[in-house]
Amino acid sequence: MTAEEEPPAGGQVGGQVGGQVGGQVGGRMRHLAQEVEKIAAEARIGARRAQRRSKLWNATYICLGFPAAVLAGISGAAGLASAGARVPAAILALLSAGFSAGSTFLRADARQMANLRRRYAWQRLETRARLVLAHEAYEGVERLHTALVELLELRAAIPSSALVLVESVPPQPQPPIGPATPPALPGPQGEP
């Protein structure tokens, strides 16, 4: 064995050690890239679901609101037209009130807007994930890891539909609890 062929101290040939390190880095990069792909797929599904829910609540809003408005107008016209049409006009007015109450109770308009906001948030997340795959996936393990952490933070920031509805309702003022001024402390013995 010549000096050129002698292995370095430790018994490992340089190519094997470098190959193991390179394989570990490549494996980590693949694993991180797969996690980013999972986030992109989840975001695509979340955006589709939010879009479908938005369409459902929009249809509900229209199906309850439009008949309420039409029935209110018809009942008013019928009630004013003749004295004999007052009973049918009252029935139409009650139906109109029922549709209006159902629309108010379900808050379909607020739910539609909440789902639109969620859809846009999911789409932003998917777009960012695609950009990470296109750029940071080739910049190194640390950069890809940092981008993945940012994506996970974005995903955690997407509110559920229940939270969006709760946040859209203004908080009711609460009356103060207890007296506004602290109670007077008794003085030393003999003083009032």
Image (tube, grey):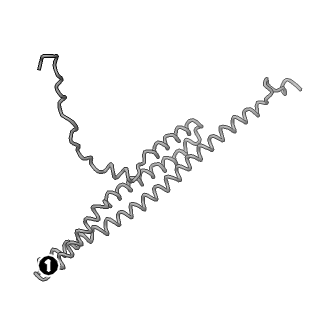
84 relative position to 40: left or right: left
Disc 1 on helix, strand or loop? helix
**Residue assigned mark 1:** 86
Residue 62 against residue 183 in the figure, above or below:
below
Quarter of the figure with the N terminus: top right
Please tell me which residue lies in front, 160 or 35.
Answer: 160
Q: Amino acid at mark 1?
A: Arg
Expressed as whole percent of the image width and height from the top left, the position of residue 70 reads: 23, 73
Please tell me which residue lies in front, 135 or 172.
Answer: 172
Please tell me which residue lies in front, 61 or 169.
Answer: 169
Please tell me which residue lies in front, 177 or 13.
Answer: 177
Expressed as whole percent of the image width and height from the top left, the position of residue 162 reads: 38, 53
Residue 44 against residue 71 in the figure, above or below:
above
Q: Residue at x 76, y 30 (%)?
A: 14
To which quarter of the image does residue 51 belong? bottom left
Q: Residue at x 24, y 47 (%)?
A: 172
Residue 91 against residue 32 in the figure, above or below:
below
Q: Residue at x 67, y 38 (%)?
A: 24
Quarter of the figure with the C terminus: top left
Expressed as whole percent of the image width and height from the top left, the position of residue 126 reads: 49, 50
To which quarter of the image does residue 30 belong? top right
Residue 78 against residue 54 in the figure, above or below:
below
Expressed as whole percent of the image width and height from the top left, the position of residue 191 reads: 12, 17
Q: Which residue is at the far bottom?
A: 84
Q: Which residue is at the far front?
A: 190
121 relative position to 138: left or right: left
